[in-house]
Structures are given as C-alpha cells and as structure tokens.
Amino acid sequence: MTTTSPAYRRASRPADRRVVGGVAAGLADHLGVPVLWVRVGFIVATWLNGAGILAYLLLWRFLPLATPDDAPGVESATRAGMRGRNRLGRREIAQTVAIGAVGLGVFTLLSVVGRGPSSHLLVPVLVGVVGIALVWRQLDDAAWNSWLRQTSGPGHIGRIAAGLALVSLAAVFVISEGRGWSATLDLVAAVAVAMIGIALILGPWVSGLWHDLGEERRQRIRSQERADVAAHLHDSVLQTLALLQKNAQDPAAVATLARRQERELRDWLYGDDSPAGSTLVAGLRAEAADVETAHRIPVELVAVGDAPMSSDVAALVRAAREAMVNAAKHAQVSRIDVYVEVADGGAEIFVRDRGVGFDADQIPDDRQGIRGSMVERMQRHGGDTRIRSTPGEGTEIVLTMPLRAAQEESREA
Amino acid sequence: MSELSVVVVDDHAMFRSGVRAELERLGAGRVEIVAEAEDVPSAVRVIAERRPDVVLLDVHMPGGGGPEVIRQLPGTTYLALSVSDAAEDVIGVIRAGARGYVTKNISAPELIDAIERVAGGDAVFSPRLAGFVLDAFAGTIDVAQVDEDLDRLTEREREVMRLIARGYAYKEVAKELFISIKTVETHVSNVLRKLQLSSRHELTRWANDRRLI
C-alpha cells in the first residue's frame, strides 16, 4: 500500500467528470471498475422494471457532490481564468448518449413484445426522469457555484422551470391515464393555471429571499477568505520581509530566508499541507526545510509517490536527514538534490551533492553519523545504504527500504 | 550561435523587468529580448508579429494560461517558466507543446543555457519536471480524460527520467548509463513526444477536446 487512506472510503460524485449527475463516474471510482461498465450496468438494470433509473436517482440524491478540492493558489488561478479549463471529453459524452440510446431501444423493444414493463407508463416515467435530472443538475451546480463563482442568470431559472414543467407533465400523464385526450388537456390547463398563480403570489418574495441569502453567503465567504489570506500573509510573509531588512548585509541569510518563505508560500498555495508526521514525503520535506535553515544551503526535493508514516518510514526519514546534514556540512557545495520514489512496495531515497567527495572505504571510526545514524539504522529496519563517492566529483547516498503494510509491521512488533 | 530573439510572456511586470535586466547583463550577444507580453491576447499578437526564436512562457496567465497561447500559435518554440508547482498545470503546458520547464528561481546563466538548448531543438527538463513526468506516467497525477492514450515509458526512458530527477545533468546521465549525450537527448525528446501524444492528429484532437467551445 503506497497511499494513505482512511478506514473506509465514502463514494461521491466527481463534479468535474459528470455527464449527467456524476453517479456512474463516482461509482466507478469507488468500485475501481471502468465507468463504461457502470453505465451499461445501469442501463441493463433499467430493463428490469426500471430499477436502474430508480437506483441512479437514489444514488444521485444520496451521494455527495465532490468538487475538485484544489489548493488555494490553483483555485484562484482557475477562478481568474489563468489555467484554462478541463472540459469533459466529447467522446465520453457521445459514448454515454449512445449507451443511453441503445438502452432505450432495447427497453422499447421489450415493452412492445410484452415482456418488459407496461408500455403506457414508459413515456411519463421517461419525461418525469428527464425533468428531475434537469432540476437536480441545476441545483447541484447552484450549490457548487455559489462558492466557486457567482450564480444565477436567466438560463439557470429557465432550466429549473423546464425541469419542473416536465415533471408536472409526467404527473398529468399518469393521473389522466386512460381518460382520453380532453381530460389530459383539462388537467394540463388546471395545473398550469395553479402554477402561474402560485408563482405570481410567491414569486417576488421567494426571489428576494433567495437573492438576500445568496448575497449574504457570498459576503460572508469573501470576508472569511480575506481574513485567512491576511492572517497568512501576516504570519509568514511580513515576518520574513522584516527579517530580510534586518539581514540585508548578509547575502547568505537573505537567500535562506527568501527560500524558506518561498517554500512555505508555495506549499500553502499549490501544495499539500499534510502535517510533517503523516507521510514519508511530508516528513522528508520538513527535514529538508530544517537542514536548509540550519546549514544555509538549498535542498532541492523531488518526490514521486508517497507512503504513510510507520516506524520503518520514520527511520528512513531520519537516515535521509543524516545524509542531507552530512552533505551540507562536508561537501562544500551550494545545493543538495534529494529524490524520493515510492514504488513496487519499496521506497528509495537519493541524496546527491556535487561536492568534494570522500573515499567510502576510509570513513574514520569516529564519524558516528554515517555508520550509526545511517547504515546501522537502515539495517535494523530491513533497509540498505549504498554510498557512492568520488573525491572531487561528489557523493550520492542511496537509501532503500522495503515497505510493509502497517498491520504486518505491528503484528511483528 | 547567432543571437536568439526571445519574447517574455508573464503577467508580473516585476518579473519581466528582472529577467530583462539579467539577460541584458549576462546574455549580451547570445539572447536578446525583443518584446514582452502580459496576457494571452497580447502574447499571441506579439509572437505572431515578431516571430521570436524562443518564447519564455508563464504557466498561469489571464486569458487561459500558457497552454492557450501554445494552442493558438503552435509553430513557435516555448520554454515554460513559472513559480507555480501545481503538477497538472506544468504537465498541461508541456503536453500543449512547450519544449521544457524551468522554475523562476533559476539562475541567469542556467536560463540562458536553457534558452539556447530549446532553440537548438533539445528538451529542457529540470529535476522537478522529471519528477512530475514520472508521476504522470505512474498515474499519480490526474492529467486528463484521454490518458489511456498515454504511452508507457520504456525502461531506459524511465531510468533517464529518474537520474534527471536525482539532479543529474545530461552529461552525468550519459556517463552513468554508458551512453552518449546525444542518446540521452533522444530519450528525453521521446519522453516529451509521448507526453505530447504520438501524432499530430492526436495532438489536435487533444487540443480540441480542451477548447472552450
């Protein structure tokens, strides 16, 4: 297992990948199967007395909409149109429509030959479902938009109205079933008159309320966001700027301060802010920052993959720290490269400098760092240390550690 | 090599003037900034008019960001430059067609070197970009819908990417793997091509899929 996951996963509907309601995409993510299978599954289930449609609507109602949870910097860039938008592939939409059409065809065929659900219910049910989908989709978007960007506009209300109209039409179909065309017309007229009446009476009040609520919420969110940003800028950037002014005559200190601030701001804006103790990469990042500050040397950390913290991983992080500190102290270089990769049940860390190097066979016995803190610690946890160093060309320390699942480790302990 | 014409596209005036000052001081006779632009429409206009050898392109910009500029004028050589480390966006600008990616804290001599290398047809990969690329091919970064099309990296290409991510320069990669620098460059170009999809047709389709229609 290479990723952290909570005790159980909750399914959700991904807002950025839905064709209709996002139910199929969410289920596919949750079950780990291709989304096409799920869609076909819903269609096939629909042939059984419409169970598929019912299940789809229920799931739509009860699965939460998951909006892309971006870091603040990314989100704001998206809002300002600086990123370009990720659009749903046309192919996927076409595919879904095609599946739907085939499903509808089979459904109709079944009801015509009399083996499926009765055909006189087919049309009203379909009309009703389309209406419900229209309204729900709109409400989904409204809930999402209200905090992403500003909502409303005539299209928004128009689509809700169209959806409601379709649903009412379906209801009329069902109620007037078997009573002939004129009864249908009468009912439609009655419902329409009633709806117009209600809209006239309640309309202004509802729209005023709606508007006030939205406005108030937007204001509140905006002021909260502003407070967050202000607090963050004060805590970090302002302090650093003050320190920079005080250290203006010391270029190395200025560079270190600027770098630390840059890393902090970048983590906050674009990155993951997982706490230092939670994963391998977060731990390494904290140690790298520490070494950078203590030894005034940039540490360039590149990570591929990640693993949850365990006693093995903690030992690996401490060994890596020792390698970084060694490079910072002895290599006489202006930067250290650290690369960590988690794959195939193991973690590998490369700590590299282009410094003076040393002869690996002649490490003096008093150099506790390499022997005690790295080699032996790694061995105790089933890992391995390789040191490649050429005098004059630099040093690379390679730490490898097989990663066991957490349960396995605790059972052994 | 004759002097290369460069257009700087970035929405931060302070950064543009900083780059200009550095390149004028250290890059005289090698690179020359012929124009600047601050958003997508002005960038498209300036690039079409001046036809520079290399465009330094910010990733995030008003009007759709760096990828939008590349989509509108795909024939130019782009080097992406940003402070943004949102992996999807960096991979996005590379996939749109940039020949390389460097971060804004790069030193001036390194930047001049990178400009000359992309102008010469090479790809410029920083350790960070190599890490993103490995992540993208491992499926950790959610790049796009059409990712079934993403070819796998060969074992050799992966090895080259890993060494670059470890901080090795091309020369050091070549020495480590007992191959020539040209071969390293070929591997890196192949990785770039795989990211940018294998054929012109697919690239166009990919771009169309992402257009705001």
Image (cartoon, coloured by chain):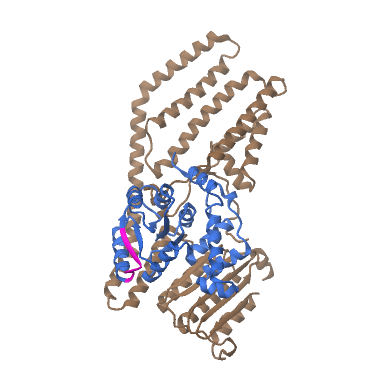
Chain colours: A brown, B blue
- Residue A357, placed above or below residue A189: below
Q: Position of residue B12 (x, y in %)?
A: 31, 57
Relative to residue B33, is residue A319 drawn left or right?
Answer: right
Task: Decide if residue A275 is in sight here.
Answer: no
* Residue at the (56%, 16%) spot, across then down: A175
Q: Position of residue B33 (x, y in %)?
A: 32, 61
Q: Position of residue B10 (x, y in %)?
A: 34, 56
- Residue B53, magenta (yes or no): no
- Residue B27, magenta (yes or no): yes
> What is the quadrant of the N terminus of chain A in the image?
bottom right
- Residue A15, placed above or below residue A55: below
Please name whichever residue, A229 or B55, is drawn nearer the observer in this view of the structure.
B55
Please name whichever residue, A372 or A351, is drawn nearer the observer in this view of the structure.
A351
* Residue at the (30%, 78%) spot, across then down: A250
> What is the quadrant of the C terminus of chain A in the image?
bottom right
Counting every numbered tag in the picture gives 0
Rendering quarter of residue A57? top right
The single residue placed furthest to the front in the displayed view is B2
- Residue A290, placed above or below residue B62: below
Q: Position of residue A173 (x, y in %)?
A: 56, 17
Please name whichever residue, B6 or A291, is drawn nearer the observer in this view of the structure.
B6
Rendering quarter of residue B20? bottom left
Relative to residue B21, is residue A126 drawn left or right?
Answer: right
What stretch of residues is rendered in magenta?
B26-34
Task: Decide if residue A336 is in sight here.
Answer: yes
- Residue B91, placed above or below residue A201: below
